[in-house]
Every structure is written in structure tokens, then in C-alpha cells.
């Protein structure tokens, strides 16, 4: 870790200016990812603009019936917020399936969106990695890629975005509010993260110096029919191998609206609008769910160690859709899988 | 008044602290943070060393440019092979007590790289942060040698295996063959053949390795606070290399935050810290990062081939068990892997082999139940497979092939209550309710499976010494240079001392972890209770003899003329066995003697005749329930009953904790643990707590521990067998067997992660 300077910004525009005024600056949220990366010398910011004192930790209702999640609200406060629990239980369940209570108490919503991949090589300076050092090569291809992706990968990077929270936000079609040197703008969640292509060093579409100020949830929270299914190597404190967030609007056994997203399989939370369309207006059935799952992974590419994610992903979609469409029927395995207190 | 008591010839008024669930005396210090670990001794004027490790697996350092680093204010020195002074010359000086055969790794001696993450330089600075930063900008150039191999399968395919040589203490070569295993196999009614694999696993104790060396400024005198499982082993290693006298290199290790075998051998941080301290004539601390903990040895990746056959009743006709394991290029780490199969089951025909192959990794190391955890996974899986073939219940099958003598050495066991483990464990578990048919039990989406496994472990004892001092106010202090890596040594030794001298436990204090105390072996092999316990008992008996003499010198002593064998020590008194009213309070003896204290030093060692005549082992049987979501490949171990026969249980509370821990280790080995080795880079890649998975609380459900009654007066004076490793055995196999029972799918390659069940 190198030496750095630090400013505690008190207002959003002050933070944006502070960042612009320092070469090699980085924003600091809860620090649960950035500080680790600094200790491993993966990130070497010369300056930190700390966001801890910004007035962005509120969760407030929006005029259109939606909910605004402050970028500095912690993952824990978001998950346990009464409005979130009541109206967006999918989001609440998803957050609680991630990390540990200690981490969730520190981690901010903004930081969660910007956390870096957990690809082993990205964290280890001894190894080539295009995301960390563009042009050096991708060790995960042909290497230990258990945590890597099978959808939307490129020849230069097969990393995944590791967040749980973001998978739910993608399914809920949240909007990210940002402020930067050129003012404010909003970004649709589907456009926030990007695929690696030949620029794997870029995780998202933020411009330099842009700060996430809030995440807006639309009014529809799919509070009746939803599920977050997370498959991982242990019951807690492990990233998803594959996860599925589902929100359905049902009319009896007919699916009126379907939104779902996958985690652990791609460089961004994976949405497939055409697959969602296949569900809409149809009667929920295992056959239909299997067809949808097959469609989602039609173009998937496995890389040896992680090839199992294709089959696992399909099964996870089927199970998650089953669970969401039959909400009244409790399913035992889910009690284990999502048993994060 | 004495005449009115009708005493049988011998009454023992034991205060019976042994066998009581007494809490650890050091508990409050540990939970309040008062207990200091090696990296927590903030001695004055401390400098900090940070290790730079090799990014490459094989090759040579061609250039080290330390100029930028040395120019940083506060950086004191950069050590590397270029400037490390030469110390001892011969390999033997670098051999510690438990070194395997070969040539021990010498940190910073050569420019050659032998394994990835090899320490190549040490940066010493005035603060830890500065040393860490300086290490990150040190420029080292390497000539990479692409001709390396870290892939054990590849080494095996290339015929690189060789018979494991002797050379390491405690290693037993495979048992001699019996009969004709191949022929019996061919002729048998039922047979199975399987290859069982587990990959490299790292110990990952909570406390990272660290050494704080205090430079005492008095000649070369050092106080070395080290993370280790054996201060004396570190002392002799350091003394030989640096030519220091015993009083110059005092090693202290009061608390050890877990070791599991990684702290048996002195690790490279202690060498580096002592070297830097001597060179700079200054106090220095070197502590490792979690990532660097993956360069300190690991349970070796092992491939095992097992062939078993039985007659149509399920009686074993042949046992063949071969193991193929990795070792480093420079040492031959050996474990006892295949012998356990021969000890557990009788068969007229058996054949065993154990081979090693050299790959480009750091030397593997003993890790909790080394060899036995490995071997028991294979044999206990194979036995299960054969029981299905023979159509015999897995428990019944084991009972059918039970042996009352050790077939590998044709000796009786000093005691073996495995049969009670089977019966009591099965009863507690409800095994008789088991539907033998695989895939027969469902609970909603989940398939339920029941499986079992068993194991045995050496009940060994090493020579150990202790000293004791009883002061006039009745306080007894007993000390030995042994270790407590969390197992409960402090409390059990306190109990043994209190019981031997019949003192209240509050009046007894046990000290350990300091080479100024009498020598004790490293804490490993589950032998501490037997070895140090016997020494503590012996030294307390010495004190007892002295007390008796002093008592007999008292005027009108009621103990006049009685031999030591005929008295007992209980509730603070010495009493005649034959007439317990003939008694004197120990406090009175001390007061009358005029002595400020009574002192003794003593040692204990195994009885050579008994160890020659008997096979000495602890045993266990584990019963497991799993629930499997077949579609998603998830496995949950919902219930375990672990029944253990380990002789006398000194403290059921700490012993139970050991078996609980061992069981969790078994679950971990079965379901999670694997260091992912990238064979392109020759490097372990999941080298952190986030990605090297061990269970969290949510993974662990009900675990029930049973200690069956087992009396053994042959094994050692205390009749104890140790419980550090036994709890782990059979558990991984029981889980794989339960998964088979649940799903009909046999997995022979650990860990049983989601992908293996899809
Ligand atoms: C061991 C471990 C296990 C974990 N397991 C999980 C898991 O299972 N699921 C899961 O989802 N997550 C998991 N996490 C990740 C955790 O959720 C993230 O580290 C956390 O959400 C990051 O938030 P933070 O506020 O601490 O971000 P920081 O570490 O402060 O910052 C992360 C990044 O975001 C940037 N940043 C922060 N805030 C803003 C902002 N407002 N605007 C612009 N940029 C910003 C920083 O510059 C930095 O690049 C785990 C983390 C660890 C260490
Ligand atoms: S997958 Fe991406 S992050 Fe991983 S090694 Fe390749 S380039 Fe780096």
C-alpha cells in the first residue's frame, strides 16, 4: 500500500471538485473493497475523497411511488429498511444473501455497484491480468476460472461482477443517479455495467470523476412473487457461483410481467429481455421455465473449470422461477441456501 | 476416633478434578485480548520486516535493485541472497526435530526459485506500513525457467513416482504384503476398485505466522516470541543455524492461535526475524499476510487406488491400498497413509504401496490427522462401496470384518473399544431406522442420505519433562516448554497436577511455551496429553515424595514409616491408604518444615516394553446425515454423531471441543477445501480467506460427540490417548457415503462441491 492523502468531503459538489483536483484520486465509500485492493497493491490511489460525511444515506419515497436509495446508505440499513422489506423484499433478501453482517454494516450501496471482480488473478500482482494491467493477458482463460463467467465473455476477459445487490437492482430495473464534473445524469441499470470486450479494465459506464449519488427504484417491487436464489460454495460469506433474482407479476397461474437477472455468470448482472418476453402471458410451468433457461444460455461458453455454470445456471433459473411463481409453497432447500441471519 | 471407621483396605479420596469439564484458565485472557500472541509483543524500539515473495515458480533471481527502497527515510535494510551473511553450512543445521528427509529450504540463501511465493527478500523499516510499501516497490528481475511441473497427475503419468523413503520421525512405511491379494481379488464374489483423490489443502489457522525478536542488547541475547507449536524445536533450529547458546535464544510462545500442523516446523519468518535482529542488532518483527500463509506447507495432494474384495457373506478377501502423493523438489515429506486400512480390517490377503513424486511446490506439511485423514477417506469410502456390492449394511459389514489384533504388526491392541463406538454411535444416530436403498428417502425437494465412516490414530507418547514448585502458601506452579495451540493444554495439565497432589485447582498454575522450562516435544500427533501429562504427573509425584518425607520428619507424624505407594493426596492432605484418618494437611507439612518451597523436576517417557508388545490406537465411528438438493448440487450435513474411544478423557469439555473441531474439519475436507493450483503458473490462486473455503457457522448443524468408556493402563501412566486428530477421521468418507446413499452417485474426488453432483 502506498501513502495517500485524504479529504473528508461534506457536500456532493465539493467531493466532485476534490476528486477533480487530485491526480490519481479515488472515491472512498465503506472501504470494504477499495482498502483490500490497496493492501494488495491492485489499486494505488494517491488521494482518497472520502464520501462518509456526504448527506446521501437516506432512503426516501419518490413522487412516482418509487424509492430512492442514498448511495451512502449501508447495505445493512437498506436491507432492513421497512419500506424496502415491505415493498422490495427481493432487494432485501438479495442483500442479506451477500457477504456477512459485518461487511454489510460497512458497505455502501454506491460502493457495492462499483466493487471490482473477485477473479483470483485480478487480486494477484504476480499474474497476468488484462483487467488489472491491460495487455498483459488473461490468466483465467485456461486457468482457475471457477469464479469466472460463461455469458458475454471476451477473449481478453471472462471475469464476473460479483455483487448480489446489483442482480436484484437489474431485475428491478433501477436507475442510477450520478453527479460529475459535467453535472448530473441518470443511467439505466442495464447500461451501468458493461461487458469486457477489448477494454476489460472498464467495469462500468461512469465517466472519470462521476459520483453515484443514489439509486432509484421504480414503483413496481414484485413484492408478491419474487425470489433470490444464490448458489455458492458455503452457506454464507461466499460469492455466488450462480444467482438468480426474479420478480413476477402473476394473475393466477399466468405470468403477466417477468423480470429476472443472473449473477456470477457475466461481467454484469445478466438480463435477457427476450427470455423475459417468453414468460409473459404464459402459464407458469416447469417446461416453460426450462425453455427459458435454455434460451438464456444458448450462447454460453464454458472455460473448463467453470463450464458447470451453464447447466447449473439453467437449473437455477428453473428453480428460481418455480419458487417465485409458487410463492405460497415454501421450499426447503431455499431455507438453507438463503439462511443468512 | 480412628478405630470407629471401618475402612476397606484402600480408599481413594481423589479430589477427582480429572474427568471434570473444567473451563480453560486462560479463557478470560483470550476473550478480553489480554493474551498476547507473537505479533502482539510491542517491545521498545521495534523495527518491522516485510517479506517479498517470488511471483515465479521456477528460475533464478538475476538482479535486485534496492536503491529506491534504501533511499526511503526509515528503511533500514533490504536482505536478500546477495547480502545475507552465511551461517551454518550443512543441511543438518537446518533440520528441525520433525524435518522430513532431504535438504531443508534455506530462506534467502540462493538466487534459485524452488516454488511460487518463495521468500526472496526481507525489507526492514521503522514502521510496518513503510516496510510493506517499500517491499511493493523493490525491483527484482528473474530468469524464468519454463521447465516446471506442479501437476501431480502429469508427474504420475510420466512415471515420476518413487517409493517413499524413510527419514521422517514417526513415518511408518507401508505394511508388508500378506497372502496373494491379486489372486484373492480375482477369485472373490464381490469386488470394487476405485481411485480416491483430494487436492492440496492449507492449514489456515486464524493467527498468521509471526515472530517478534527482542534484542536485549547484551551480547547476542535474544528473546524470540514466535508463533509455533513447539518452542524447543524453534530454539534448537535457531541455535544451530546462528550458533547461539540456549540462554541466547530464548523462545516464547504462550498462546498459539491454531496451528493444525503448520507450526510443527519452524517457519521462515522466525529465521528471517532472528537473522535481521542479529544483523541489525535491533528488535525486529516479521509477520506474514494471509496470502503468504499459502507458502508454509499444505496437506499434500494425494491420489489413492483401493481394491477390495469380499466373499458372498461380506467377509473381506483382499485389501489393496496404494497412495501417490506430492512432495517438493528439495524434501521428501512423508505421511502414513495406507497403513490404517490394514490396522482397521482383517484380511488374509493384503498389499500396500506408498509413492511420492516431486513437483515444483513448497514442501507439504503435516496437517491435522496427517495421512490418516487421507487414508481413511479412501478406505472408508471403499468399504462402503463394497458393502453395497455384498448387500450388507455398512455398519454390519464393518462389524463382520472387525479385528481384535493389529494385523499389520500382529500385535494385540492395548485397548480397542471401536466396537462400542459403532454400537453407541449407531444407537444415538438411529442407524437401525435406515432404509438401505439409495435414493429411498426424500424430504420435499431434498434427498436424505445416511452414511458412516470410522478411523484410528496412533496413541503415542514422547519423552517430556516438567518442573514444579510448591510454595509455603500452598500454591503449586508446574512448568513445561510444551504448547497450547488452543487444544486445552493449560487446563488439562492443571487438572493432572491438582489431582496428583490433591490440591484445589485454584491453587495450581501451569506455565508453558517458554524454552526456559524443561523440554517438551512439539504439540502434534495428539501426544501432548499423554507425554506432558505423564511428565506433570511424575513431577507432582516427586513433590509428593518430598512432602511425605517432610511430613515424616514432623513430631509424632501420623505417617511415620509409610511408603509413598501407600499414601494418597486428596483435599489438601496426605493420608495413609489403609487408614485415611492417619493424615496431615499439606499446609501443616510446609509450615512445619520451615522451607519456603518444595521443588522438583522430572520427566516421563514411553514404556518400551508396552510399546513393543502392543499396538496403541484411538478409534472413532462417525455417522452422518446429509440433505442433498439434487437439481442444484447442494449438500448440507444436517446431523453428525461422532463416537470416540480415546482412553481416559481428562476434560470432557475441551475434549469435546477437539472432536467438534475435528468433525468440522471433516465436513470442511469433504465439502469445501481445495487450494486451487494454477498449473500454468505453478501457483495457488485462491490464497485468501474469501476464496479458500472452510465452513462458516451456517454450514454446521447438529454434532453429537460420544466418548465411549475405554480403560487402558498399558498405553501410558495416565491412560489417555489424545483427541486432537481422531475426531476428524472417517467424517469425510461418511459424508461421501451419505451422499451416495442419498443420490446413488459416488463421488471419489474431494471436495464435493456443487459441480461434482450436477
Ligand atoms: C470477504 C468479502 C465477501 C464479500 N461477499 C459479498 C457477497 O457475497 N456479495 C456481494 O454482493 N458483495 C460481497 N462483498 C463485497 C461488498 O459488498 C463490497 O465490498 C461493498 O459493497 C463495497 O462497498 P464499499 O462502500 O465498502 O465500497 P468501497 O470499498 O469504499 O469502494 C468500492 C469502489 O467503489 C467506489 N465508490 C464507492 N462509493 C462510490 C460512489 N458513491 N460513487 C462512485 N464510486 C464509489 C470506490 O472508489 C471503489 O472503487 C464481499 C466483500 C468481502 C471483502
Ligand atoms: S478474467 Fe479478467 S480479471 Fe480475470 S484474469 Fe482474465 S482479464 Fe483478469
Image (spheres, helix red, strand yellow):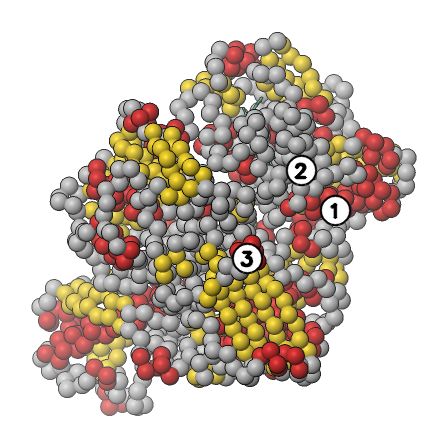
Query: Separation of disc 2 and disc 1 at Cα?
Result: 13 Å
Ligand 1 image-quadrant field: top right
Q: Position of residue B381 (x, y in %)?
A: 61, 68
Nearest to the observer: residue B107 or residue B535 = B107
Q: Which residue is mark 3?
A: B158
For residue B717, side relative to residue B329 (left or right): left
Q: Is residue A166 visible?
A: no
Kindly indicate whether the residues beneath marks 3 and 1 are on one polypeptide chain: no
* Lower position in the chain sequence, tag 2 or tag 1: 2
Mark 2 to mark 3: distance in Å?
Answer: 33 Å
Against B108, residue B185 (above or below) is below
The chain to which mark 3 is attached is: B
| Mark linked to residue A322 | none
Along the horizontal axis of the image, is B447 left or right of B124?
A: right
Q: Mark 1 Cα within 10 Å, few/some/many (few <14, many 20+)?
A: some
Q: Between marks 3 and 1, how big is the CA–CA gap?
A: 34 Å
| Residue toward you, B444 or B275 | B275
Q: Secondary structure at mark 2?
A: loop
Identify which residue, B184 or B588, lies in the foreground: B184
Tell whether label 1 touches label 2 (CB within 8 Å): no
Q: Name the disc covering residue A149, or none.
A: 2
Which chain letter matches label 2?
A
Which residue, given by chain and number where applicable, does mark 1 sit on?
A: A311
Residue found 45% across the figure and 60% down from its top: B368
Is disc 3 surrounded by few (<14), some (14 to 19) or many (20+) residues within 10 Å?
Answer: few
Left or right: B398 in relation to B241: right
Looking at the rendered image, the quarter that the N terminus of chain B falls into is bottom left
Picture coordinates of residue B33, whole percent (x, y): 36, 45
Q: Give the secondary structure at mark 3.
A: loop
Q: Same chain, marks 2 and 1? A: yes
Amino acid at each position: 500500500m502506498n501513502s495517500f492523502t485524504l479529504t473528508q468531503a461534506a457536500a456532493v459538489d465539493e467531493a466532485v471538485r476534490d476528486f477533480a483536483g487530485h491526480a490519481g484520486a479515488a472515491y472512498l465509500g465503506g472501504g470494504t473493497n477499495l482498502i483490500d485492493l490497496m493492501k494488495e497493491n491492485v489499486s494505488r490511489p494517491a488521494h482518497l475523497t472520502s464520501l462518509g460525511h456526504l448527506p446521501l444515506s437516506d432512503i426516501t419515497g419518490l413522487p412516482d411511488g418509487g424509492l430512492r436509495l442514498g448511495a451512502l446508505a449501508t447495505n445493512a440499513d437498506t436491507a432492513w429498511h421497512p419500506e424496502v422489506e415491505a415493498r422490495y423484499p427481493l432487494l432485501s433478501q438479495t442483500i442479506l444473501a451477500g457477504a456477512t453482517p459485518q461487511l454489510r454494516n460497512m458497505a455502501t450501496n454506491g460502493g457495492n455497484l462499483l466493487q471490482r471482480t473477485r477473479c483470483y488473478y485480478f487480486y494477484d500482482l504476480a499474474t497476468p491480468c488484462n483487467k488489472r494491467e491491460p495487455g498483459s493477458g488473461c490468466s483465467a482463460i485456461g486457468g482457475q476460472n471457477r469464479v469466472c463467467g460463461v455469458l458475454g465473455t471476451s477473449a481478453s476477459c471472462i471475469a464476473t461482477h460479483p455483487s448480489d445487490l446489483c442482480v436484484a437492482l437489474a431485475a428491478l430495473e433501477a436507475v442510477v443517479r450520478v453527479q460529475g464534473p459535467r453535472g448530473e445524469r441518470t443511467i439505466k441499470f442495464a447500461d451501468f455495467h458493461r461487458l469486457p470486450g477489448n477494454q476489460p479494465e472498464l467495469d462500468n459506464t461512469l465517466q472519470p470523476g462521476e459520483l453515484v449519488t443514489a439509486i432509484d427504484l421504480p414503483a413496481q417491487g414484485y413484492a408478491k412473487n419474487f425470489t433470490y436464489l444464490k448458489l455458492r460454495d458455503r452457506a454464507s460469506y461466499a460469492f455466488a457461483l450462480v444467482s438468480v433474482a426474479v420478480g413476477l407479476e402473476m394473475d393466477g397461474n399466468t405470468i403477466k410481467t417477468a423480470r429476472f437477472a443472473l449473477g456470477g455468470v457475466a461481467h454484469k448482472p445478466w438480463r435477457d429481455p427476450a427470455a423475459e418476453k417468453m414468460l409473459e402471458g404464459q402459464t407458469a410451468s416447469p417446461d416453460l421455465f426450462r425453455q427459458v433457461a435454455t434460451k438464456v444460455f444458448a450462447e454460453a461458453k464454458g472455460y473448463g473449470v467453470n463450464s458447470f455454470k451453464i447447466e447449473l445456471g439453467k437449473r437455477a433459473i428453473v428453480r428460481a422461477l418455480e419458487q417465485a411463481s409458487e410463492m405460497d409453497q415454501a421450499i426447503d432447500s431455499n431455507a438453507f441456501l438463503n439462511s443468512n441471519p | 476416633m480412628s478405630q470407629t471407621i471401618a475402612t476397606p483396605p484402600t480408599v481413594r479420596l481423589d479430589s477427582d478434578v480429572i474427568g471434570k469439564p473444567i473451563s480453560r484458565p486462560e479463557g478470560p485472557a483470550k476473550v478480553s485480548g489480554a493474551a498476547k500472541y507473537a505479533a502482539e509483543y510491542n517491545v521498545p524500539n521495534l523495527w518491522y520486516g516485510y517479506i517479498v515473495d517470488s511471483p515465479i515458480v521456477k528460475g533464478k533471481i538475476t538482479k535486485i535493485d534496492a536503491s529506491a527502497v534504501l533511499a526511503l527515510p526509515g528503511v533500514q535494510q533490504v536482505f536478500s541472497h546477495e547480502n545475507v551473511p552465511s551461517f551454518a553450512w550443512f543441511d543438518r543445521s537446518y533440520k528441525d526435530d520433525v524435518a522430513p528427509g532431504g535438504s531443508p529450504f534455506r530462506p534467502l540463501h540462493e538466487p534459485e526459485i524452488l516454488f511460487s511465493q518463495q521468500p526472496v527478500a526481507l525489507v526492514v523499516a521503522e514502521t510496518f506500513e513503510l516496510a510493506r510499501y517499500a517491499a511493493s516497490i523493490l525491483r527484482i528481475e528473474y530468469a524464468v525457467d519454463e521447465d516446471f511441473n506442479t501437476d501431480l497427475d502429469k508427474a504420475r503419468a510420466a512415471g515420476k513416482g518413487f517409493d517413499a523413503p524413510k527419514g521422517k520421525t514417526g513415518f511408518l512405511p507401508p505394511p508388508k504384503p500378506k497372502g496373494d491379494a491379486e489372486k484373492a481379488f480375482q477369485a472373490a464374489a464381490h469386488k470394487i476398485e476405485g481411485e480416491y483423490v483430494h487436492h492440496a489443502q492449507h492449514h489456515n489457522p486464524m493467527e498468521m505466522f509471526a515472530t517478534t525478536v527482542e534484542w536485549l542488547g547484551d551480547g547476542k541475547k535474544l528473546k524470540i516470541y514466535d508463533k509455533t507449536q513447539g518452542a524447543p524445536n524453534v530454539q534448537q533450529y535457531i541455535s544451530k543455524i546462528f550458533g547461539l547458546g540456549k540462554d541466547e535464544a530464548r523462545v516464547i510462545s504462550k498462546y498459539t492461535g491454531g496451528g493444525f500442523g503448520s507450526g510443527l516446523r519452524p517457519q521462515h519468518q522466525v529465521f528471517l526475524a532472528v537473522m535481521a535482529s542479529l544483523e541489525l542488532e535491533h528488535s525486529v518483527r516479521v509477520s506474514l499476510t494471509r496470502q503468504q500463509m499459502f507458502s508454509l506447507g499444505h496437506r499434500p495432494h494425494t491420489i489413492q487406488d483401493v481394491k477390495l474384495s469380499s466373499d458372498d457373506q461380506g467377509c473381506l478377501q483382499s485389501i489393496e491400498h496404494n497412495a501417490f502423493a506430492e512432495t517438493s523438489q528439495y524434501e521428501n515429506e512423508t505421511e502414513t497413509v495406507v497403513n490404517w486400512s490394514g490396522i482397521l480390517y482383517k484380511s488374509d490377503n493384503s498389499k500396500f504401496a506408498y509413492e511420492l513424486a516431486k513437483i515444483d511446490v513448497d514442501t507439504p506439511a503435516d496437517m491435522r490427522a496427517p495421512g490418516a485423514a487421507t487414508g481413511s477417506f479412501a478406505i472408508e469410502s471403499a468399504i462402503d462401496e463394497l458393502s453395497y456390492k455384498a448387500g450388507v449394511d455398512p455398519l454390519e459389514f464393518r462389524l463382520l470384518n472387525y479385528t481384535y489384533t493389529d494385523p499389520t504388526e500382529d500385535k494385540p491392541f492395548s485397548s480397542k473399544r471401536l466396537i462400542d463406538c459403532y454400537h453407541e454411535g449407531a444407537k444415538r444416530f438411529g442407524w437401525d431406522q435406515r432404509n438401505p436403498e439409495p435414493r429411498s428417502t426424500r424430504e420435499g425437494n431434498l434427498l436424505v442420505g445416511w452414511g458412516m465412516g470410522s478411523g484410528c490414530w496412533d496413541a503415542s507418547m514422547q519423552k517430556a519433562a516438567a518442573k514444579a514448585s510448591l510454595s509455603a502458601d500452598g500454591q503449586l506452579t508446574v512448568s513445561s516448554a510444551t504448547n497450547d495451540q488452543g487444544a486445552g493444554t493449560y487446563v488439562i495439565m492443571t487438572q493432572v497436577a491438582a489431582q496428583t497432589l490433591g490440591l484445589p485447582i485454584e491453587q495450581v498454575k501451569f506455565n508453558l511455551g517458554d524454552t526456559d522450562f524443561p523440554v517438551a516435544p512439539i504439540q502434534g500427533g495428539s501426544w501432548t496429553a499423554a507425554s506432558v501429562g505423564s511428565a506433570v504427573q511424575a513431577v507432582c509425584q516427586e513433590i509428593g515424595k518430598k512432602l511425605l518425607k517432610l511430613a515424616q520428619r514432623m513430631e509424632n507424624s501420623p505417617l511415620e514409616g509409610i511408603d509413598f505407594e501407600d499414601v494418597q493426596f486428596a483435599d489438601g492432605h496426605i493420608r495413609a491408604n489403609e487408614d485415611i484418618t492417619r493424615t496431615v494437611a499439606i499446609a501443616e507439612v510446609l509450615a512445619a518444615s520451615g522451607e519456603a518451597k518444595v521443588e522438583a523436576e522430572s520427566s516421563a517417557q514411553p514404556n518400551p516394553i508396552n510399546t513393543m508388545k502392543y499396538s496403541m490406537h484411538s478409534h472413532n465411528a462417525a455417522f452422518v446425515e446429509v440433505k442433498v438438493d439434487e437439481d442444484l448440487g447442494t449438500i448440507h450435513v444436517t446431523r453428525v454423531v461422532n463416537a470416540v474411544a480415546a482412553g481416559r478423557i481428562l476434560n470432557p469439555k475441551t475434549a469435546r471441543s477437539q472432536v467438534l473441531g475435528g468433525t468440522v474439519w471433516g465436513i470442511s475436507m469433504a465439502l469445501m477445501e481445495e487450494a486451487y493450483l494454477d498449473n500454468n503458473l505453478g501457483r495457488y490462486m485462491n490464497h485468501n480467506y474469501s476464496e479458500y473455503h472452510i465452513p462458516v457457522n451456517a454450514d454446521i448443524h447438529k454434532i453429537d460427540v460420544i466418548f465411549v468408556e475405554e480403560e487402558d493402563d498399558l498405553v501410558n501412566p495416565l491412560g489417555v490417548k489424545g483427541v486432537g486428530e481422531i475426531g476428524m477421521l472417517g467424517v469425510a468418507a461418511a459424508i461421501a457415503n451419505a451422499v451416495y446413499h442419498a443420490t446413488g452417485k459416488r463421488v471419489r474426488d474431494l471436495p464435493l462441491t456443487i459441480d461434482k453432483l450436477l
